[in-house]
Structure formats: C-alpha cells, structure tokens
Image (spheres, rainbow, N blue to C red):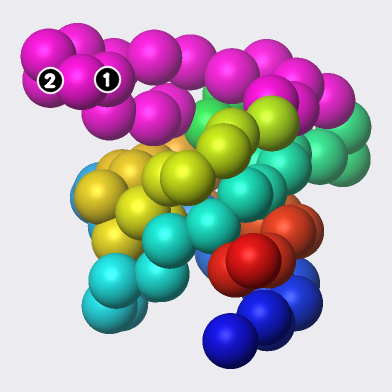
Amino acid sequence: MNNVIMRKLVLTADYQPLAAERVVGSFTISAPPSNENDAIFQGDEGADVPWVPGEWHEFNRVNLAEVQVKGTPGDIVTVVGGTW
C-alpha cells in the first residue's frame, strides 16, 4: 500500500524515534532553519550526529522507528515522504 507520510516531531532533551512503530519508506528528514540549535541524531554506532538548522537529507528504504533524535525542547524535525 502507498501512503504519504508528513510528520513534525517536537524535540526533547532525550532521544526519541521518528515513528512509534515500524514505517519503512523513502523520506526527506529536515531540521528547519527556524530551529534554535542543532538536532542531534543517534548515529549507527551510537555517536551523536548534529544537524545544523536548515540541514536536510534524503533517505530510501529507511525504518523511521530506528532513527533516534533529540535536541533543544521546542525545536522540530520534519519527515516528508512515503511508503511506496
């Protein structure tokens, strides 16, 4: 089934997944330029990976439930794409 996914995740000081359950698809994940500070993603080996405000990347066949992010409370990360 094809589904369009458009999400806004409000960051917290603790890591949280981009989805509560398995969602695999192709997505553009963005840290909007309006953020006050870096969004911090958890790298594949556990290290913090900072994204500056305005940074975005495209991903194919990624499970959003496995992508963890944290940052300044109130800043956001957006996810746009779909499962096709």
Q: Amino acid at mark 2?
A: Gly
Which residues, given as a range, are shown in magenta? 40-57
The residue drawn where x is 41% and y is 69% is 23
Query: Magenta span has 82?
Result: no
Return the x and y of residue 78 as percentages of the image width and height: 70, 55
Residue 24 figure quarter: bottom left
Return the x and y of residue 31 as percentages of the image width and height: 70, 36
Residue highlighted by disc 1 = 43
Q: Is residue 37 visible?
A: no
Packing grade of label 2 (10 A; few <14, some 14-19, many >=20) is few
User: What numbered label is drawn on residue 46?
Assistant: 2
As rendered, which of 45 and 82 lies closer to the eye? 82
Q: Is residue 67 above or below residue 76?
A: above
Q: Amino acid at mark 1?
A: Gly
Question: In the orientation shown, which residue stands out farthest toward the left?
Answer: 45
Query: Magenta span has 56?
Result: yes
The residue drawn where x is 75% and y is 77% is 4
Q: CA distance from mark 1 to mark 2?
A: 5 Å
User: What numbered label is drawn on residue 83?
Assistant: none
The residue drawn where x is 60% and y is 68% is 83
As rendered, which of 42 and 22 lies closer to the eye? 22
For numbered disc 2, what is the local secondary structure? loop
